[in-house]
Amino acid sequence: MKFARKVLLTAAIAVFPALAEAGAIDQLHQFLNGTRTLKAEFSQIVINKSGRKPQQSSGSVAIARPGKLRWDIQKPYPQLVVGDGKRSGSTTRNSSR
């Protein structure tokens, strides 16, 4: 459950950059307490010290409270991470769906 909450917190910060103002922590707590489900697409680029883009990934994330998480990475290779609040697991999949 802590993992799903951390993911939800990260997603909320990414989705709502306006929350970075004064009082943002309180607003974020209110948002998290009132949020029961969340579904989003994501894109991540890891840039090394030289400024090159060595890795880019994308996919989707879905959260249903309490404790359910589905993190579906589609690129660069398919990977699925799921959790139910008590257990979590991951698997890589063949790229043809």
Image: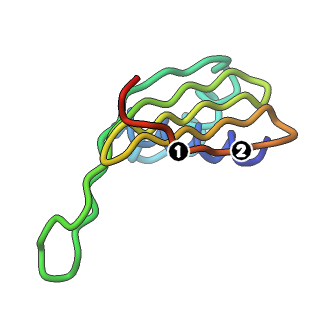
Q: Residue at x 37, y 46 (%)?
A: 77
Residue toward you, 17 or 4? 4
Quarter of the image that includes the C terminus = top left
Q: Secondary structure at mark 2?
A: strand
Q: Give the label, 1 or 2, closer to the camera.
A: 1
User: Whole-percent x and y of residue 79?
Assistant: 49, 42
Q: Residue at x 74, y 23 (%)?
A: 65
Residue furthest to the bottom in view is 49
Q: Which residue is mark 2?
A: 89
Residue toward you, 54 or 47? 54
Q: Quadrant of residue 82?
A: top right
User: Whole-percent x and y of residue 73?
Assistant: 43, 39
User: Whole-percent x and y of residue 66?
Assistant: 79, 25
Q: Secondary structure at mark 1?
A: strand
Q: Which residue is mark 1?
A: 92
- What is the count of numbered marks? 2
User: Whole-percent x and y of residue 1?
Assistant: 79, 41
Q: Residue at x 64, y 45 (%)?
A: 90
Mark 2, Cα crowd under 10 Å, few <14 / some 14-19 / many 20+, is: few
Q: Is 17 situated above or below 96?
A: below
Residue type beneath disc 2: Gly
Q: Residue at x 68, y 40 (%)?
A: 4
Residue type beneath disc 1: Thr
Q: Quadrant of residue 50?
A: bottom left
Marks 1 and 2, Cα distance to the nearest angstrom?
Answer: 11 Å
Q: Is 95 situated above or below 39?
A: below
Q: Is 74 situated above or below 56?
A: above
- State if disc 2 and disc 1 touch (CB < 8 Å): no
